[in-house]
Image: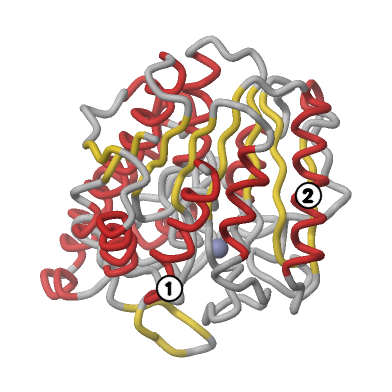
Amino acid sequence: MLIVHNTLHRQHAGRHEMFRGRLVPCHESPDRLDHLLAELHKRPVGTITEPGPLDEALLARIHSPRYLQFLAGAWDEWVALDPANAELDALPSVWPVRGFRADVLPANFAARMGLFSFDAGTPLTAGSWTAARQGAACAVAAAQAVASGSTRSAFALTRPPGHHAGTDFFGGYCFLNNAALAAQTLRDGGFERVAVLDVDYHHGNGTQSIFYARGDVLTVSLHGDPSTEYPFYLGYADERGEGEGAGCNLNLPLPRGTGFADWRAALGRGLDEVKRFGAQALVVPLGVDTFEGDPISAFTLRSADYFDIGRDLASAGLPTVFTFEGGYAVAEVGINAVNVLEGFGS
Ligand SMILES: [Zn+2]
């Protein structure tokens, strides 16, 4: 397995996220990746490399130009509001909900923060853009290696995660959708039908929305029931795609407290759908926040279960790209993620 590592990830280090009326320390922290890297050094499941420059044209096919332009300048604009802001994370606090206009582009930076986001849990920092771009480059490089046939599987070892980011919005700790970039790269590399099978605890709303009207990319997500779990407003079972993408989205929401036997049965349904679709390559947004010890999630998977997840995913027999997503029981993040990769390769 090829592992493409984001060496610049530490530049995105949020201080606080808004949670129930308080600013609390960010769950999505650089030490998550340190634990994963340390575990990979103990149990080398593949070759670790760094990505080349990011393909700007590809990035602009997944994300809207005005969103990318906003992200590129956001930190400078934030500090321009008040030099003291350099010591604070930028967080949105106003959003254009139903009845407001989303077609206008307000000059006010706070207004544009809200236009291009969907929550106040995703701090934008001085290095967020640099880190997110390098992460996107990791996902693209991983997919290019798989598409070229130089490796059968690859893992984008990166943060911030990506699966909540849509065409023109950030949120859920995500800015650029690494899984979508990987899927598009596989399409461009000659695979005519690509499946995304998202196993993070949270619904992959960004990836779903990016491919919702496309018939060439299947999106499947197993996740906490959005009626009680973040991101709440997408991820229900009746969302099946639209237009050419009708029938090309499958959501498998599961109740809080779901254990491995039921979760694994849902994974089996997801894999059946991937097969039925006739996918030629697979992208797995890999979150390990399904773990019983995760502080913001409510499934009860144990560390040993992650070997089986890897084996089940390998049973699809497809060229596969993993992108690293959630997982906030920091000390166990490395063990659980590497268990998946080890199970996949065994
Ligand atoms: Zn998650």
- x and y, in percent, of residue 271 in the image: 75, 40
Q: Which residue is mark 2?
A: 251
The mark nearer the N terminus, 1 or 2, is 2
- x and y, in percent, of residue 98 in the image: 70, 57
Give the amino acid type for the residue marked by disc 2 in the picture. Asn
- Indicate the quadrant where residue 214 lies: top right
Q: Quadrant of the N terminus?
A: top left
- Indicate the quadrant where residue 127 lies: bottom left
The CB of the residue at mark 1 lies under 8 Å from ligand 1: no
Disc 2 element? strand
Q: Residue at x 13, y 75 (%)?
A: 84
Residue 124 visible from this viewpoint: no
Q: Residue at x 28, y 38 (%)?
A: 47
Q: Residues within 10 Å of mark 1 (few under 14, many from 20)?
A: many
Q: Which mark is residue 332?
A: 1
Give the amino acid type for the residue marked by disc 1 in the picture. Glu
- x and y, in percent, of residue 314 in the image: 61, 38
Using the image as rendered, state which of residue 86 and residue 325 is in the foreground: 325
Q: Residue at x 81, y 35 (%)?
A: 273
| Position of residue 29 in the picture relative to residue 233 (left or right) | left
Using the image as rendered, state which of residue 253 and residue 227 is in the foreground: 253
The Cα–Cα distance between marks 1 and 2, rounded to whole angstroms, is 27 Å
Q: In the image, which is nearer the foreground, mark 1 or mark 2?
A: 1
Using the image as rendered, state which of residue 230 and residue 185 is in the foreground: 185
